[in-house]
Structure formats: structure tokens, C-alpha cells
Amino acid sequence: MRAKNIVSGTKEGNKVIYTLKDPMIVELLAVARQIFNNHLVDTITILDKFRDEEEEVMTMPKK
């Protein structure tokens, strides 16, 4: 990330402390997390519907 100019590093003894070069990156990551979570919720909803339909088919009486 240093090469992409996203963070800067400061060496303190044997540690390197990284800081964001632009505080808006925090906001960007927060929005990205919301988008990811929305897609995850949608995917879980679709999977739940699929599972419910599959259970209905499995419990139908056979002729």
C-alpha cells in the first residue's frame, strides 16, 4: 500500500506504524463494507428461498 501511496510508515524501534495518507479512505472502506453487506444479505435471502423450495419438493408425497 505504500507503493500505491495509500499509507505512510514510520519506524519506531523494531515496529513500523502505518497511517492512512487520506482520511477519506476510512469513509470509502465503510461504504464498501455496506455494499458488501447488502450483497451478502441478498445472497443469503436467495439461498434461503432456494433451500425452502428444495425442502418443499423433498417433503411432497410421491405418487
Image (cartoon, rainbow, N blue to C red):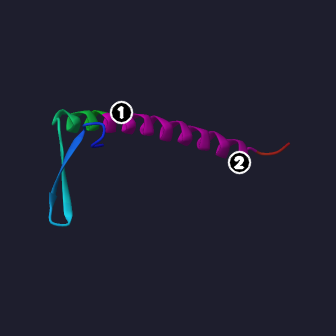
Q: Nearer the viewer, residue 57 or 36?
A: 36
- Residue identifier under label 1: 35
Q: Residue at x 60, y 44 (%)?
A: 51
Magenta highlight range: 32-60
Q: Is residue 52 magenta?
A: yes
Q: Which percent across, then down, holds residue 32?
A: 32, 35
Please state which of the two labelled residues, at mark 2 or mark 1, is closer to the viewer: 1
- Three-letter amino acid code at the position of disc 2: Thr
Q: Which residue is mark 2?
A: 59
Q: Earlier in the sequence, mark 2 or mark 1?
A: 1
In the foreground, 22 or 35: 22
Mark 1 is on which residue type?
A: Ile
> In the structure shown, which secondary structural element does the residue marked by tag 2 occupy?
helix
Seen at 30% across and 37% down, the residue is 4
- Dot 1: within a 10 Å radius of its alpha carbon, few (fewer than 14), some, or many (20 or more) residues? few
Horizontal placement of 40 versus 23: left or right? Answer: right
Q: Position of residue 37 (x, y in %)?
A: 37, 39
Which quarter of the figure is the C terminus placed in? Answer: top right
Residue under the image location 55 percent in, 41 percent down: 47
